[in-house]
Image (cartoon, helix red, strand yellow):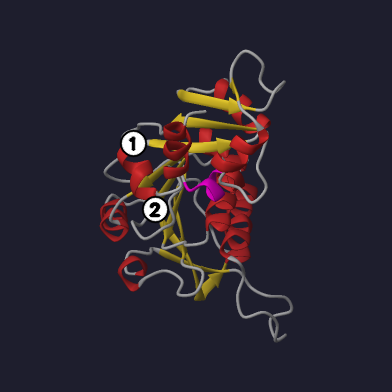
Amino acid sequence: MTKAEIQFVRSLADKQVRDQKRLFIAEGEKLISEIIDSHLRIRNIYALEGILKGRAEVVTSKEMERISQLKSASNCLAVVEQPRFTTPATAPANTLSLALDGVQNPGNLGTIIRLADWFGISDIFCSESTADCYNPKVIQATMGAILRVRVHYLPLADFLARTAKEGTPIYGTMLDGENIYNSQLSAGGVIVMGNEGKGVSRECTEHFTHRLLIPSYPPERQGSESLNVAMATGIVCAEFRRTK
């Protein structure tokens, strides 16, 4: 690799550069093989000798260590074009969507994208303060789900307001909510999950049509103060799919 190539790949660790170039980094043979078979376009693949033969530019272990954005360098890395898709004005009424308000941890975001893929949720609508879905840590945590789930960034409160006005249910988990296991859940709607520490902002909760609670067990027991946002998302999505 040339010095300029190495510098360019390393520069994609910066969100501003990723946004400007509309590129992201993916690492690992399994993930890159999935991308090769997907609709996404790959700019370059760099790999150690014997990996992805005929598809990759062979690099040394030292070069891979320099361009890798993981703690332990993988055996191959791809520079991939970010997908382009249209963000709808409102969430679809007849299918289930997720909305994330200020989720900051890349691992949580990646896991939520993976959960969405597992539960057949095609769209995630994110506030502009939510972590970047093309952050290398997020990409790795999705385990390939980023190829099948559309992640949109937009002014979330306005989006929820328009969606609620169309009559689409907006569900949010709140401490004063109704026990989710006793609730009538619709087949379509938006599930809103909030920031790891602050929860969902007031601007967004104003547009909830249903407030849900994931109860602890037993109710009177003094246990953990809250659930991890990715874990809570999994519980809520599973309950929606179980009842519909």
| Badge count | 2
State the residue at coordinates (67%, 79%).
224
Q: CA distance from mark 2 to mark 1?
A: 21 Å
Label 2–label 1 contact, CB within 8 A: no
* Residue with the mark numbered 2: 126
Q: Which one is in front, 175 or 3?
A: 3
Where residue 159 sits: x, y (%)? 29, 53
Where residue 151 sits: x, y (%)? 42, 43
Q: Nearer the viewer, mark 2 or mark 1?
A: 1
State the residue at coordinates (33%, 48%).
16
Where residue 34 sits: x, y (%)? 61, 27
Magenta residue span: 135-139
In the rendered structure, which amino acid carries the disc numbered 2?
Answer: Cys
**What element does badge 1 sit on?**
helix
- Of mark 2 and mark 1, the one earlier in the sequence is 1
Q: Quadrant of residue 223?
A: bottom right
The answer to whether 42 appears left or right of 230 in the picture is left
Label ID, residue 21: 1
Q: Main secondary structure of the magenta part?
A: helix
